[in-house]
Amino acid sequence: MTPEEFRTAAHALVDWIADHRERIPQLPVAARVAPGEVAAGLAEHAPEAPEPLEDVLKDLEQVVVPGITQVQSPHFYGWFPSNASLASVLGDMASSGLGALGITWQSAPAATEVEEVVVEWMRELTGLPAGWRGAIQDTASTGALVAMLAARERSSGYSGASGGLQAQDAPLVVYASPHAHSSIAKAVALAGFGAGNLRLVDVDPITYAMRSDALAAAMDADRAAGLRPAAVVVSVGTTGTTAIDPLAEIVPIAQRFGAWVHVDAAMAGSALLLPEMRHLVDGIDGADSLGWNPHKWMGTILDCSLLYVRDPEHLVRVMSTNPSYLRSAVDGEVTQYKDWGIPLGRRFRALKLWFHLRLDGVEAVRARLRRDLANARWLAEQVEAEPGWRVLAPVSLQTVCLRHEPEGLGGEDLDAHTLAWAAAVNDSGRAFVTPSVLDGRWMVRVSVGAEPTEREDVAALWQLLRETAVLAPSSTGA
Ligand SMILES: Cc1ncc(COP(=O)(O)O)c(C=O)c1O
């Protein structure tokens, strides 16, 4: 494709994207395809000869779009928001168009330095401690793995450079809430601690936040048994209920054991853009790392996750490699992001954040976040005021955990009812919510915060939930 051909095709594609975004509110929210249906709509073999763009766009429209759950819809309340602001989409396009190779500072000095500047802007905007430095990772899962590797190496005296964990005289233990995201258990296992050395610490039965007294007791018991407490993962905004583990209480406990403190704020990090929400990370000065996803609520298109550390030198020591073909005369003066994470080749992700901040402006993002917090509070008030309905966890951010509890219905019948009405809501195409288990029973998470969702959309959702739950099988005895 020549640049001229690209110009024509790209204009057509941008028109298609703009049209698509405009019609998203009218599309069914949940993907309506059976397993294998999308694949069956595609050619069996790759084309030998070029095809016209119109044919590709036709398939995009007819085969691909129905196979996508429309998370950019104002009626999307599933999982967590995964906003893809169009300003950030432009940055993503610019990144692709530049075709830069991010392997060392030398391979694209701008890719490194734009990232340094934007990551520092974000540190300032979220009130994280001066002196902390960060890098853009693909996801919070990768960020957690990097943090666990850094924790392992600090606790084991850089064992990775010698016999690894196999040469340690005592097992290293990691602590987290049972409500921590599944990526934490995965990171602990992948970093070699072993799933058996992940302690799930008791939580408060009302707030679902980690109990710091239980943490202290678990760490003491492990040390008395000859184990070595190595890290505590503090969930600020758990996936199930957005529970906030008490960082300020946890930090001094972890410090007594020299344990690394990683804060997983994948979702809640966006809230730190609001000065009034910074209390969520009180105590952060004493932590070691924090990861969060602009690609969730804030709306910088996937993938864009920030990982900050208090001691960048330690991280670089753990992550660095130095083969001859990557060396340059400026190595001592520049940041080499290959030494801040796992991959060598890195995309120019900073551009999407840079475009997002510059074209939308931070004030508009803050206004949207405040709107969503208020909408979630409003919904929780409606639910609490409605007989037969219950809010099941504190609404600390923008997610409301709720259940319709018709009189006389409990146990598995209540579960069946919950799953039936949640499925009916999702099948209607008019909204999308996520059922999830809390305290052994199904409930429904309504995660407010899609970019276009306004109060009237949330009011329409509440109407839909009530109508649907009343008709759902178990409540009628059917
Ligand atoms: C609290 C929390 N941590 C981590 C993750 C993983 O995020 P990612 O998809 O960026 O790996 C999620 C995803 O929803 C999350 O909610």
Image (cartoon, rainbow, N blue to C red):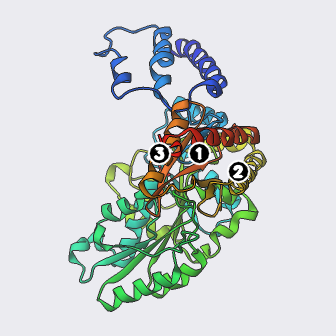
Q: Rate crowding at label 3 as few (under 14), some (14 to 19) or many (20 or more) other CA atoms within 10 Å.
A: many
Q: CA distance from mark 3 to mark 1?
A: 21 Å
Q: Amino acid at mark 1?
A: Pro
Q: Is residue 273 left or right of residue 260?
A: right
Residue 67 percent coordinates (x, y):
45, 27
Q: Amino acid at mark 2?
A: Leu
Q: For mark 3, give the secondary structure.
A: helix
Q: Is 462 placed above or below 437 here?
A: above
Q: Amino acid at mark 3?
A: Leu
In the image, what residue occupies the spot 64% across and 70% down? 129
Say which residue label 3 marks.
419
Among numbered discs 1 and 2, the one appearing first in the sequence: 1
Residue 58 percent coordinates (x, y):
49, 12
Residue 81: assigned label: 1
Q: Rate crowding at label 1 as few (under 14), some (14 to 19) or many (20 or more) other CA atoms within 10 Å.
A: many
Residue 398 percent coordinates (x, y):
65, 53
Is residue 130 shown to the viewer in this render? Answer: no
Is residue 421 shown to the viewer in this render? Answer: yes
> Mark 3, mark 1: which one is toward the viewer?
3
Among numbered discs 3 and 2, the one appearing first in the sequence: 2
